[in-house]
Amino acid sequence: MIRGSRLGRKFGTLALALCMSVIGVSPAHAATFEESQIKAAFLFHFFHFIKWPGPPTEDISKPFIFCALHEGPVENELKELLLASQAHHSTTLFGLIADPSDTSACDYLFISSADKHLIPEAVKSTDGKAILTVSDSEGFAHQGGMIELVRRENRIHVLINLQNVTEHRLKVSSKLLQLATIISANERGSEE
């Protein structure tokens, strides 16, 4: 189900909208945030807007697992956000996976642009599994990925391949869909 409490979803909506607007301001104002911090904030808040199959979060004793293939600036910022959320009763964990074909413990997989050569293998390993895949690698959403973070000028744009998402039995909140550009598997979506 949608991860997080009702208050968490409201905060998440506000934070996600803030992230999207911060990147759109002048470079002088946006300079207070590193790109890795903005991307990590997106990653952290995306999971509030995705519905996984199965029982509601409150009924699950298993923690929600964010996975990555290596530790880089975005992954380190995400770990900080997850640690802070654990102080507020969240059951989220961060894990590194050494083998891109072993995603069995993951609920969420981030593949950084530094690991773009591993995208085909990592995405294939999620076939048939309800694992959200996100990357900041150009063309990710056309390679079987679900959400792609793209930097254009001074903005981070969110591209969602809705077909890839639904094929994995995940549902995207309409709030996130309103903030994103929906693309098809065949051609790149236009920016709004």
Image (cartoon, rainbow, N blue to C red):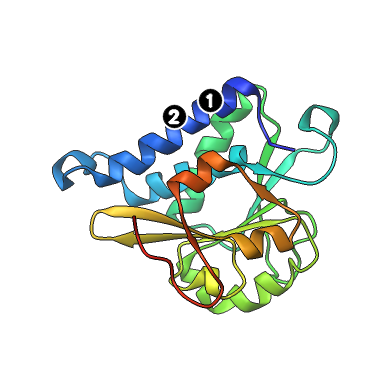
- The disc at residue 122 is none
Secondary structure beneath label 1: helix
Tell me if residue 53 can be seen: yes
* 65 relative to 87 in the view: left or right: right
Would residue 79 be seen by someone viewing this image from the given angle? no
Name the residue nearer the viewer: 124 or 186.
Answer: 186
Viewer-closest of 26 and 95 = 26
Residue located beneath label 2 in the image: 14
Distance from disc 2 to disc 1, alpha carbons, whole Å, reads 6 Å
Quarter of the figure with residue 30: top left
Q: Residue at x 66, y 30 (%)?
A: 4
Q: Are marks 2 and 1 in contact (CB under 8 Å)?
A: yes
**Residue at the spot 45% in from the left edge and 62% down from the top edge:** 136
Give the percent coordinates (x, y) of residue 10. Answer: 53, 25
Residue 151 locus on image (x, y percent)? 33, 60
The circle drawn on residue 10 is: 1
Secondary structure type for disc 2: helix
Is 16 on the left-hand or right-hand side of 97?
left
Three-letter amino acid code of the residue under disc 1:
Lys
Name the kind of residue labelled 2 in the image: Leu
Looking at the image, how many numbered discs can be counted on the residues?
2
